[in-house]
Image (cartoon, helix red, strand yellow):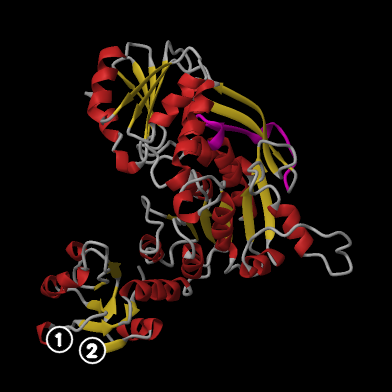
Amino acid sequence: MELLSIGEIVEATKGKLLCGSDKLQIHGVSTNSKEVEEGTLFVPIIGERVDAHTFIPSVIEAGGTAIFTSKTIDVSLVKENQAIIQVEDTKEALQDLAAYYRSKFDIPVIGITGSVGKTTTKEMIAAALETKYRVLKTAGNMNSQIGLPLTIFRIEHTHEVAVIEMGISESGEMSKLARIAKPTHAVITNIGVSHIGQLGSRENIRKEKMNIVNEFGVDSCLFVNGTDDMLMNILPYSEYLKLSDKEKTQKYDKIDISDATNASLCRADVVTFGCEKDCMYYATDVTISNGHTKFYLQNTVKEVISQENEIELQVLGEHNIYNALVAIAIANKLGIATSVAKQGLKDYLPLAMRGEIMKVNGITVVDDTYNASPDSMRGGINVLLELENVSRRFAVLADVLELGEHSYSCHYGVGEYIASKNIDEVVTIGEEAKAIVKAVEDAKVDIVSHSFDSNQDAIDYLKGNLKSNDAVLVKGSRGMHTDEIVTALRQ
């Protein structure tokens, strides 16, 4: 993080300096009191269970340079060269300061959202861009109203591009994130059913995620999955919006997005990617061998198609082809030739618990336990099917959380999908995932199925039944802790 003065911080947050000099400087921001040291600004967040204001005395003792507070504080505790800044709301002050800090950097910022695959897409875009630029990327899942500001504070003047993950779970969040990150380019991977329990419908999810473009300026570009049924009309709709009133001879059905999004689409380019020929970046001649995926990039935007555009990935799954396509599209937009960007993609390996494939005692394990949605479960099943030289295929799936009243139908739909595939066994954990087994049984297909109430019960069954040369996919919502199953299988 670049240095910020207390005076700048007070002005950016409309706060009040209770004590300390406005000439003091900080070089880090933290919401974790245990990470505070000299030069750190501590932001105490009021959570559902803990109010971090209770840690202010320990932060003062640790030598933190500055502290936000929205509550009354005994300034007599404050030491020399420390500052206390009164703000109305500490979380909003964190966001205001991050927005100010972002404004200090004139670099491309790639914002990434979508119901599935944000992290992998972010990693692959960064891999392509790092072939030419010094790139900052979101660490872990720091993509929320608190995590995203902390990511922004990691930008320094040595960075030439930032690739920022932007996740939402409720209405109104994306506008806040866009105000902070001010992406110059944005990616929407897909519109699925993650968080549909809070947002109510896929239409509402699309409307919320489309707010990622609301801070677009000139020369901005939105990249959308042109094969997603909720996104395929974004390009033609944006072209319609750019027409003059005289040119709008035929009425075009309005997509339900905010007025700010409509305005941004009028001044932005839209690029589509996918596996269909009407996309601007699309893949053909896909082959899978020895755990690698190869395809030919077809590009109707810029480059001449040639053998040079054969792309090789060390990952499986159609979703990773989409990720590679948008990574190349963004690289091209920022002046990197496909022949260069593709080398970064060839070197990319999946992160732990995000589709990581490993051999354990003769068994192939696909560890996709970081999180889950119905759509990503289908993607995981496809990866399981793409594995070569496998005797039996086991899908071990736990509850997908936060689906609300849609939970049964979403889980049942996953079961219907499995029933149409060449899967040998389905093992589920949790109450909601029982609908997956119900769909498989209703389909009357030759797939063995079992439901368990705990990870340990599933572990006991798997250890007693898995054999050498079997393959197993393990996946579930983070709150189901399915990584425990992978850990047990590795022992």
Q: Position of residue 179 (x, y in %)?
A: 50, 70
Amino acid beneath label 2: Leu
Give the SS element for disc 1: helix
Percent x, y for residue 168? 45, 57
Q: CA distance from mark 1 to mark 2?
A: 8 Å
Q: Secondary structure at mark 2?
A: strand
| Residue 194 location (% of width, % of height) | 47, 47
Mark seen at residue 75: 1
- Identified at 30% across, 13% down, the residue is 465
Q: Residue at x 40, y 37 (%)?
A: 354
Left or right: 271 as drawn, with respect to 360: right
Is residue 193 at least partly visible in the picture?
yes
Q: Can you tell which quarter of the image residue 322 is in?
A: top right
Is 314 covered by the magenta stretch? yes
Residue closer to the observer: 361 or 346: 361
Q: Which residues are magenta?
A: 302-319
Give the residue type at disc 1: Val
Q: Is residue 476 left or right of residue 22?
A: right
Quadrant location of the C terminus in the rendered image: top left
* First along the sequence among labels 1 and 2: 2
- Image quadrant holding the N terminus, namely bottom left
Mark number displayed over residue 232: none
Up the image or down, 222 lies above or below 304; here it is below
Q: Is residue 335 visible?
A: no
Residue 227: x %, y % from top left: 66, 41
